[in-house]
Image (spheres, rainbow, N blue to C red):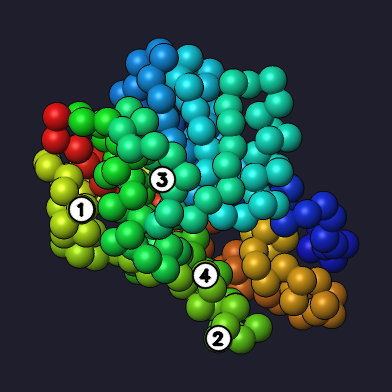
Amino acid sequence: MSNQQWQLSGSMPERYEEFLVPVIFTPWAQELLSRAALTEGAELLDLACGTGIVARMAATRGVRVCGADLNPGMLAQAETQSAGQNITYRQADAAGLPFDAGRFDAVICQQGLQFFPDKPGAVAECFRVLRPGGKAVFCMARGLEENPLMRAQVRAFTDHLDADEANAIRAVCGFADPEETGALFADAGFDPVSVQAVTLELNAGEAGAFVNGLMAATPASERIAALSTEARAALHSDILAGFGSCHDGKALRFPHVSNVVVAAKPA
């Protein structure tokens, strides 16, 4: 898909799975699962599961998994991607989970907490559904200044689209204060609580194709599709330029920095 022939195909969840999951969400899923350290037969809640990459990877390790998300389109795509695996999915609000108290050994939430309207309620619900001794393992992107992926999009969207489209990307980095994050989990009863800045070096392979994927998988994709060919090419060029030295002329290799929370429910 060249930027001259750029067009939308498939649903937003399909594009999310195709373009974003391999580069961004698979490496973070690996990171969070390593910190959860679940053994075969353990029960995991993949909260704000999206298209289910954490759930799928955990299931291959013999973990019993339930994925929960508010978005029915994402859940439908997750079920398609997980066909044949022992995973169940539920539509659920993070602040009102439809699970019994003490059911899960771990809750993993990848890049979801920053979008929850009721963060204290969501973290309290995670505490409730965990067994004593269970873990909550979360990651949320840190600030734009540390994350060229989001920074490049925000700048280009501001110049070529509008503030609303830029702010939708800015929101990815909207809950980045480690002290506020730690207090949120401590107030819910977790102890101990660790909040650590973690950097993953992500490799997007062919840069132009990846930027096309970003444009197709963003909430602004319909707006981008309505641009002229020339305007869309200019947007593509400015997103790519925004990565700066992370672009070597062919590939993109860039840091992606998040606060990673590992919080335990006291035994």
How many other residues sit within 10 Å of disc 2, few (<14), some (14-19) or many (≥20)? some
Disc 1 + disc 4, Cβ < 8 Å: no
Label 3 vs label 2, nearer the camera: 3
Viewer-side residue, 108 vs 139? 108
Give the spatial CA distance, label 1 vs label 4.
Answer: 28 Å
Question: Which is more foreground, mark 1 or mark 2?
Answer: 1
**Of marks 3 and 1, the one in the foreground:** 1
Three-letter residue code for mark 2: Ala
Q: Are marks 1 and 2 in contact (CB under 8 Å)?
A: no
Query: Which of pointers 3 and 1 lies earlier in the amino acid sequence?
Result: 3
Question: Which image quarter: residue 77?
Answer: top right
Earlier in the chain: of badge 4 and badge 3, it is 3
Which residue is found at the position 41% from the left and 14% from the top?
41
Location of residue 48 in the rendering, given as x and y in whole percent from the top left corner: 49, 49
Indicate left or right for 140 with 158 as reference: left
Q: Is residue 14 visible?
A: yes
| First-in-chain label (1 vs 2) | 2
Q: Which residue is mark 4?
A: 169
Give the alpha-carbon distance from disc 4 to disc 3, as whole Å: 19 Å
Q: Label 3 vs label 2: CA separation? A: 28 Å
Residue 163 circle label: 2
Residue beneath disc 3: 109
Mark 1: which amino acid? Ala
| Inter-mark Cα distance, 1 to 2 | 35 Å
Quarter containing the C terminus: top left
Asked if 235 appears above or below 88 in the picture, the reply is below
Dot 1 or dot 4: first in sequence order is 4
Neighbours of disc 3 within 10 Å: few (<14), some (14-19), many (20+):
many
Question: Of the residues shown, which amino acid type is indicated by label 3?
Answer: Cys
Looking at the image, is mark 3 or mark 2 earlier in the sequence?
A: 3
Depth check: 29 or 137 in front?
Answer: 137
